[in-house]
Every structure is written in structure tokens, then in C-alpha cells.
Image: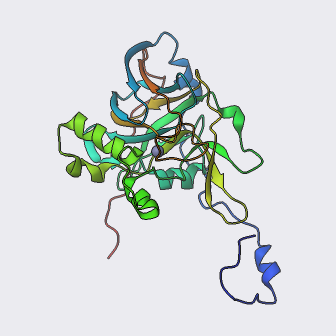
Amino acid sequence: MKLARDQVSEPRDAEARRKVAPVICYPVDTLPRPDLAAYQAARTGWEKIDEVVVPPRDARCFSVPAGCFFRIVSIEGPQVGDLNLWSADDLNERFFSGKTRALNGTHVSTGDQLWSSLPYLRPMATITHDTLDWYGFDEFGGSVHDVIGTRCDPYTHRLLSGHDYHHCCHSNLTRALAHRLGRPKDEVEPAVHDVLNVFMCTGFTRDTGQYFMKASPVRPGDYLEFFAEIDLLGALSACPGGDCSAQHSSDVAACHPLLVEVYRPKTPPQGWTSPTRNAYGRQHGE
Ligand SMILES: [Zn+2]
């Protein structure tokens, strides 16, 4: 139970109110689902067209054409990655962690789709394989690849510690995007957004509801694989927290590089077409 924060007495029917059964906010029976088998079949005979090594405590950008796949691969040692995605043509269309969470739950895995921001709201990428899918939820309520965290950033760090730390994921992503676009850091910084925490093991404490992290179960050779639904610009930061077993925003944690691989299938998945932006007409009523 949540810790009481105030001197408020319980009403007489408190238990009855607590016992009301929950309902799922967004039932997904009507959510169009990808044909996962067709996606997975399209991997046969694919060709690797690019790879990018993301150095520890730093970030790199990468491009994935619609209809291609990409993998984020653990190499050398346990390492968490913070992923941002944009539409390659329009930085305003970016990964929407909050709605992805509302639709898929707190952690994502095979078959889940990463949705873009309003007013676009379409799948940007579909997860087609996750070697850590076996983990499920542990006894603490922790799981892997969350859409509940934000990204470690120098502003919160400053707020809590009074110090500056420049190699937070937020700053890493900002530098990588600025470098890729040839634009100043302060100009591109607002495009950096809440991430998919790849390989990170997180949850909420049962007693206080606080966001927690624990050592990632990822090991070299593990990967998370995506299918690009639209032309993507991605950025991945190898978090300064390493496996995030103790702290982030630090120079103490053991950190390792991450590998991004991009694959082009011989032919696109059978029946697949790149999704159009959301059909809502944007009238918003009177
Ligand atoms: Zn981080």
C-alpha cells in the first residue's frame, strides 16, 4: 500500500472502494496488429546494409529506410541503451513513449509497436525479436525495455546533486543529433524526447510506487530487433549508468559499447504497406 503522506482519515467504505476491480484503459482488441509471421519471414536472405558502434557514455545516429530492420546488439558487456526515433523527413514526428506505454504496457517486447507523437500517431517501428523475452516480470515487478523512464539528463542531475554531468543520455542524444544534422546543439535539443530504455530492467516499488532500476540481465549477443514502418532517423545513447545496477550519470559505472545493425530484406514482408499518419481530421470541435 502507498505510504500515507498526510493526516487524512479513511472513509468507512475505504476497503470497498479499494476493492473495485480495474479495467484496462486502452483495450487493444480493436488495435490493428502487425502480421508478425510475415515480418519474421522477410528476414530470410536479408542483407546487412549498415552498422554503427555506439561508444560508451556517448550516442550515435543511424538511418533505417521503411521496410528494413534494425537490431540493437549487446557487445562486450551488459549495457543499457536510450533510444530516440524520429521520422526521417520531419523531426516533429517522434517516438511517443507515453502512448506506447498506454497501449502496450510498461515494458515492450516482440509484437509491440512504437508509436509516434500527435498528431501523427502511427507505428514507427515494430519489435520483431527480443532475446530477453524470457525475463518476463521478476519478483520485484521489474522487467526489461521500459517505456516508463525518461532519459538521464543534466538538468535533473543538477537539481539533485548540484553538479554538472555532460554525458547524460539527454546530452549524448543532443550532441549526436546536432552532429548528424549539422545544426547547433541548442537548436536540436528540443527534438530529444523520452526514450525506449533498451535492455534496462526497471519497475515501480510496490510500497512507494517509485521508479527503480536493477542490474540489466542483458549479456553480449543479446539483441532487440525492430522493423522500420516508416523512414527513420534513430539515435542511441550508451547510458553512463552501464548496466544500471547502481547509478546513472556517473563516471564510475562500467560502461560498454552497443552495436546497431541495419538489414534490408530481399522483399518487404508480404502484405505490408508503410502506415499513413492518423486519420483524425484535427477539427477538435467548436
Ligand atoms: Zn542514461
Near-viewer residue (162 or 110): 162
In this picture, residue 123 sits left or right of residue 14 = left
Number of callouts: 0
Measured as percent of width and height from the top left, residue 262 is found at: 41, 22
Measured as percent of width and height from the top left, residue 154 is found at: 38, 54
Measured as percent of width and height from the top left, residue 99 is found at: 49, 54
- Residue at coordinates 44% horizontally, 40% vertically from top-left? 83
- Colour option used: rainbow
In this picture, residue 224 sits left or right of residue 5 = left
Residue 276 appears in the picture as rendered: no
| Residue at the extreme left | 183
Near-viewer residue (153 or 194): 153
Near-viewer residue (34 or 173): 173
Q: Quadrant of the N terminus?
A: bottom right
Q: Is residue 30 above or below residue 126?
A: below
Q: Quadrant of the C terminus?
A: bottom left
Q: Is residue 276 above or below residue 160?
A: above
In this picture, residue 185 sits left or right of residue 73 = left
Residue 240 appears in the picture as rendered: yes
Q: Is residue 250 above or below residue 76?
A: below
Near-viewer residue (47 or 207): 207
Measured as percent of width and height from the top left, residue 112 is found at: 56, 40
- Residue at coordinates 26% horizontally, 44% vertically from top-left? 90
Q: Is residue 96 above or below residue 88?
A: below
| Residue at the extreme top | 45
- Residue at coordinates 58% horizontally, 20% vertically from top-left? 221
In this picture, residue 264 sits left or right of residue 45 = left
